[in-house]
Image (spheres, rainbow, N blue to C red):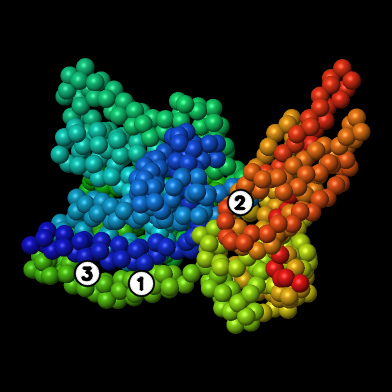
Amino acid sequence: MSTKLSKFLVFVLIICYAFILGTRINTGLPYLYHWDEPLLSVSALNMLKRGDLKPKYVEICYGGVMRNTIYALDAIYLWYLQITDKIKNKNEIKTNIEEEFRTISHPEFILIGRIVVVLYALLSLILIYLISKTYTSNNIISFIAPLALSFTSYQYLEHSTFANVDIPMVTWFLASCYFSLKYHCNKKIIYIYVSVWASSMAMATKLSGILAFVNPFLAFLLNHKYLLDLKRIKTYSILLKLFLVAVMNFLLWNPNIITDTENYVNWNKWIIEIYKTGGGHFSKEPGWEHFSFQLNVAKEDLGIIIFYGFWISILFSFVKIQGGTIRFNISEKYWIIFIPFFTYLIYMSYQKVAYHRNFMMLYPYLSIGFALTINELVQVISHKFLKLIPLIIIFIGIYFLFLPEFLHFYQDSIERYQNKDTRTQSIQRLEEIIKNKFQGNAIVGIAKDLQISEYDLKKITYPVIFFNQKDIDSASKQCNILVTTKYFNISKNSLVKADTLNFLSQKYETIDSIAGNPMFCDEDVVLRQTPHINPTILFLKGTSYDKIEYLQVYTSKRIEFITNQIITVFENFLPKGKYLIKIFSEGSLINNEGVHFKVLINGDVIKDFYSTKPDDVFLIEFALPTTKKIKLEIEMDNDLYLPEKGIDRNGFIRKVTLLKKLHDR
């Protein structure tokens, strides 16, 4: 009865936890709030776009398990998008560049990575239950461990929401622990193979997962007498096979160890060095300071009852109380729980980097220890009430300890589901402002620093120009509405001063605003790639619409003509109307003749000119009676190369600007 009931309770718990995670899984999208997401989801997507399984240098950041899993699922989803004609080419998917580290055009690909982590989190709860079940005398008590973790730990919940490697690594670590226990209890050699494989998966997920090998090593050590009974050749054969399982599985998930050895080694050497030295990241002094800091964070998160319940379970592993008598009895089975826990905690505490996400490993073990304490206390009490006491404890615990936290998690998750990032909110607010205050006609200027996602930009139905905050005065002359933010500095020595940038905005009338966080404007590469969460949005008034004569549609980069050739400058659909092309060219007189250029639209020459000066500017007007696709090209046709006379005529276009006329005046 207790087995069926406990399984039912675990099933209900999984459903509840999946529901909470499901409401949180869209957090921030299309903006990335977690540091690790670009290093996993975006890296996998970049690999898919390139069409190879070889990650570039920064994409090696973590092991291949998560990256390659997401890659495979992304490939399936991309195939679905293509067969349903939602995209025609994978290059339509925009990912990040270093200067815009958090942008992505199709947030569904980020969602794929998050779903994978959610599944790992749910699997970890099942493993916690199975590990507890190995120790407890009543299956219902085993349910207390996953219940305690899922209903009290906000840290574990939060890290189960985003695409990261910490929860997957913890899950593989727990799998290694569980199968080590199975081997210790049943002596079936298959379990030790599975434990080694799971340990290898943990390491292939995150490098610190190498500590999972403590599990099978410990189980092997505790049962060495069993191995001594085997023939020596068979023992060596088992050891060799275990070694091959670990190595081959690790290489399977990280083939770049072989195909790109130098980058793999250099990156991981750098990561190891960063963990030792801190490298500008959040740090604590290795040793007691770091050790106590991480335990205090866990205590505040889980609560003192669960936290100290774990430490009491260590006492019960040495002391047994039966029939009113106390006796010492050290159980080897407990070592498989406590030794890996302390090995991981002590090793990671002797690193300087102190991000608590590296210590998610603590939470399952603290919860298991709490359940073991409950189990021992139940056994001390008279056997007459033994069958009822676990149910009473669970009921009281759910009502007074777990239910309030669950309701808090539920409310927090619903709020996340309903509240979008301020940049997403700004798009809807922008439409309302233009409709109500600008009679439906406006040109919008958006500060590049906001890093508004292309996914959101597609929703804007008005012309948009992007500007740097320092150029806001120039942008104000081209736009009716300026969308910008407030700034602050993290570094006191920053070359870009927040006060200066904020002062530029204060010159303009504020139409509306959305409360949020100021954005840091430091030039440091680490800070530039740090997630900006809910930035403050300011809507400022620019130039009146009637005073803006032209709207800038496109500006090209520098173009070089080394020989006679035609180069495409712009190719896209344009709405009907009048247009102006500004061509900024460089030329010189050679044999009394300048560089001859022709300007073509859809193959027809609309103007030709000679460029003879380094700062020539040519204006070309044209009109479109209907919306149509145009192809704007420039041709150079009088190349001259006389090496014996030192003559080489080349053509240069500094830039081409395409403008749309807004008014017929």
- How far apart in space, not on screen, are marks 2 and 3 (Cα)? 71 Å
Which quadrant of the view contains residue 645?
top right
Tag 3 residue = 394
| Residue drawn 19% across the image and 53% down it | 133
Tag 2 residue = 630
Identity, as a three-letter code, of the amino acid under mark 3: Ile
In-front residue for pair 518/245: 518
| Quarter of the figure that contains the N terminus | bottom left
- How far apart in space, not on screen, are marks 3 and 1 (Cα)? 20 Å
Which quadrant of the view contains residue 460?
bottom right
- Which of the labelled discs sits on residue 635, or is there none? none
Identity, as a three-letter code, of the amino acid under mark 2: Ile
Tag 1 residue = 410
Camera-near label (3 vs 1) is: 1
Per the image, label 3 sits on a secondary structure element best described as: helix
Identity, as a three-letter code, of the amino acid under mark 1: Tyr
| Residue drawn 54% across the image and 31% down it | 263
